[in-house]
Image (cartoon, rainbow, N blue to C red):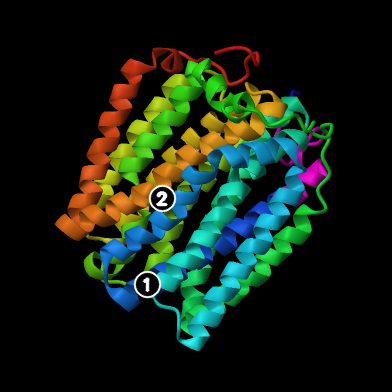
């Protein structure tokens, strides 16, 4: 029996036998779940306050700005300091921001501008947290188990995305402040749990910061067209295909449902993604990785088009589940390629660029969706996004032929 064919419950080896990985999984589930609960409450509260699709887009925009401004700094921090400490600090900052949302709601002074300022702080913390969290994984399990660990890590995110929005929607019935207080406590708990993680890799060496080291991640990716192609595909497909910001509008104005329905819509992509991630945590892809990646991205684009055309809550949920399943395939393949082909002492910088790409695609994509919806309506914004994402996938198949031909995730680190 090999590490790549073993299941989570099999013994030996088993991911559950690695205590630090289990703790990491719990911390990641908790922090992502709290963030998604907060997102549901913020989206509904802002739309109820202003009734503006553009304001929903601005929620994404203010959380996108830190990804661009701080990408180089984040990579240096993740490659020079204890990554567990960086993650702990991020949890504390997010807890303080969530507490501010609760106090502002109870005090009645939380207007649109205050919302955006607090969310900018949250976005800054997540800018440091996300790539650092990903860079921790290679130090938690043996190298042979890394692809399955990445897939299992994805189940943490998807479990949180399923439970977080649904729970946030239900708790909103007791008021948004209730949601924010619970988020505050959960972020604090995540900070405590991550402090218990132990790494197997040696401490990172604090090399002098030079102009060359600042841009080393970009230079590395330029020399690896497979990694660059996978990361840029996600950037542009998600930039056009993001629908999250419009879910409050779709829920209320098209599907005629309430906060509970919005919570189900927010959870639906994670239902499909969780099913895929669990499968991949048990058994990794064995061949034709590039073909699988592009097939998944075509399915991703088509699911957006179906969602745009739907006027039924059940059909919309199914379409979003397919959307999430296809995206999960892309995420697992992309992260596995990056983490198996990047040296640990540069992984923070490369993952920071990856997070900048995904952060740009997600948050700026939400702004794009909100701006287009404000001008032409939610239906046009979603439909155009699905068609545009499909066009990007077809274009990338021609531009990155080496990526299409990739056969296996496991490859020498100096492979392009």
Q: Position of residue 197 (x, y in %)?
A: 81, 48
The disc at residue 46 is 1
Residue 104 in sight in this render: yes
Among the 4 quarters of the image, the one containing residue 209: top right
**Who comes first in sequence, dot 2 or dot 1?**
1
Q: Residues within 10 Å of mark 1 (few under 14, many from 20)?
A: many
Q: In this view, does 330 lie above or below 363?
A: above
Distance of label 2 from label 1 (alpha carbons)? 16 Å
Residue toward you, 5 or 356: 356
Q: Position of residue 29 (x, y in %)?
A: 63, 55
Determine the secondary structure under disc 2: helix
Q: Residue furthest bottom?
A: 107
Q: What residue lies at 73% left-to-right and 37% top-to-bottom?
A: 80
The disc at residue 197 is none
Q: Is residue 224 left or right of residue 256?
A: right
The residue stretch that appears in magenta:
3-24
Q: In which quarter of the image is the C terminus?
A: top right
Q: Is residue 228 left or right of residue 50?
A: right
Magenta-span inclusion, residue 23? yes
> Circle 2 sits on which residue?
363
Q: Quadrant of the N terminus?
A: top right
Determine the secondary structure under disc 1: helix
Residue toward you, 190 or 167: 190
Residue toward you, 183 or 170: 183
Q: In this view, does 342 lie above or below 179?
A: above
Q: Where is residue 157 in the image (x, y as percent from the top left)?
A: 57, 50
Q: Is residue 375 left or right of residue 103?
A: left
Residue 288 in sight in this render: no
Q: Position of residue 39 (x, y in %)?
A: 47, 64
């Amino acid at each position: 029996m090999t590490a790549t064919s073993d299941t989570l419950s099999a013994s030996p080896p088993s991911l559950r036998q690695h205590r630090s990985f289990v703790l990491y999984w719990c911390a990641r589930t908790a922090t992502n779940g709290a963030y998604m609960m907060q997102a549901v409450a913020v989206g509904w509260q802002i739309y109820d306050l202003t009734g503006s699709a553009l304001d929903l887009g601005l929620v994404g925009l203010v959380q996108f700005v830190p990804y661009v401004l701080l990408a180089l700094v984040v990579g240096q921090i993740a490659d020079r300091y204890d990554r567990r400490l960086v993650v702990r600090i991020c949890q504390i900052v997010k807890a303080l921001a969530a507490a501010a949302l609760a106090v502002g709601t109870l005090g009645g002074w939380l207007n649109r501008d205050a919302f955006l300022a607090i969310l900018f702080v949250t976005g800054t913390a997540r800018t440091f947290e996300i790539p650092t969290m990903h860079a921790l994984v290679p130090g938690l399990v043996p190298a042979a188990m890394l692809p399955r660990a990445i897939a299992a890590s994805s189940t943490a995110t998807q479990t949180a995305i399923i439970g977080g929005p649904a729970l946030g929607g239900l708790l909103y019935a007791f008021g948004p402040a209730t949601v924010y207080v619970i988020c505050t406590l959960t972020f604090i708990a995540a900070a405590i749990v991550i402090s218990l993680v132990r790494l197997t890799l040696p401490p990172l060496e604090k090399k002098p910061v030079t102009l060359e080291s600042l841009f080393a991640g970009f230079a590395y990716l330029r020399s690896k067209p497979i990694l660059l192609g996978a990361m840029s595909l996600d950037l542009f497909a998600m930039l056009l295909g993001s629908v999250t910001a419009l879910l409050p509008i779709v829920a209320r104005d098209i599907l005629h449902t309430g906060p509970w329905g919005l919570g189900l819509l927010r959870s639906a992509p994670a239902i499909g993604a969780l099913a895929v991630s669990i499968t991949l945590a048990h058994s990794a892809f064995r061949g034709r990785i590039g073909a699988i990646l592009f097939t998944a991205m075509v399915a991703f684009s088509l699911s957006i088009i179906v969602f745009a055309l739907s006027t039924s809550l059940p059909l919309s949920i199914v379409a979003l589940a397919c959307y999430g399943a296809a995206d999960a395939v892309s995420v697992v393949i992309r992260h596995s390629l990056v983490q198996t082909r990047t040296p640990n002492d540069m992984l923070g910088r490369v993952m920071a660029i990856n997070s900048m790409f995904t952060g740009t695609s997600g948050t700026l994509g939400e702004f794009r969706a909100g701006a287009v919806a404000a001008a032409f309506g939610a239906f046009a914004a979603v439909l155009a996004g699905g068609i545009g994402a499909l066009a990007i996938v077809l274009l990338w198949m021609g531009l990155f032929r080496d990526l299409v031909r990739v056969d296996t995730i496991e490859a020498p680190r100096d492979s392009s």
